[in-house]
Image (cartoon, rainbow, N blue to C red):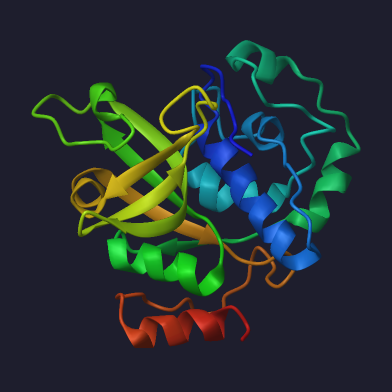
Amino acid sequence: PIRNQDGSSQCVCMTLATEMGIVFKQKYGSFIDFSSSFPYQQRGGTYLGCTSSDLYSIFPKLGNIFESIMPSQNIGETEAMAIERKNYYSDLAKPFMIKRVELPVDFETVASTIQVTGKGVMLWFRFSIGEWTDIPQVLPVPVTSGHSVTAVDFLLKDGKKYLVIQDSWGLAYAMNGYRLISEEYFTARCFLASYLKTFQTLTVNDDTPKPIYDGSVKSLQDILIYEGF
């Protein structure tokens, strides 16, 4: 499902929730809509949005709960922060603690990871808001915005490579909530890429060496080994 952050700064947590739903479906056979309000309320400060520290240090220790328990769709910043977080929610979230694996910011590596793992890849972009169209194009204007989305597929269009990204601005934006990110735009504007390990296969303090991805066949072999195949 396409998520809608409704003007709040929950794009990172909405991307996290989307990716967790994909991982849940891989493991249990059904897609579950996870909450973004639960991790968002527990990020590292009172600032708007989330930091990489939240992503790699805080959120993995929290786990998550389902959207039906703690809603996050179609509500603004104030409403999201005002939702009551009951004490027992933390216990409900523990089975879904999950580790995030950082990837190099490389178009081929992102596409290969989607292909090999079947998971979504979180991408962070810096851009001018006027660029963020159905198929974003780099404009000669100041970069003023930051945003997180989920890359879910890749394709060729008119001989050019694109990632298919799922946004969190609702169905009314772009192509029913999806956008095409060209290799050129990705190279110019993306600054972070990562994906989620499978539930309960790693503890949050796991020191298993992570493979170094370079877009080669060896990288795909390393991903498969790391994923337990």
Does residue 140 appear to the left or right of 52 in the view shown? left
Does residue 182 appear to the left or right of 165 in the view shown? left
Does residue 122 appear to the left or right of 208 in the view shown? left
Q: Position of residue 183 (x, y in %)?
A: 23, 54
> Which residue is painted at 20% across and 28% down in the image?
143
The quadrant holding residue 160 is bottom left
Q: Is residue 153 above or below residue 37?
A: below
Q: Position of residue 218 (x, y in %)?
A: 36, 88
Q: Is residue 60 something one can see in this rendering?
A: no
Q: Position of residue 34 (x, y in %)?
A: 72, 42
> Which residue is painted at 65% across and 17% down in the image?
75
Q: Which residue is farthest top?
A: 78
Q: Quarter of the image containing the N terminus? A: top right
Q: Is residue 40 above or below residue 96?
A: above
Q: Which is more toward the observer, 106 or 28?
A: 28
Q: Which residue is farthest right?
A: 88
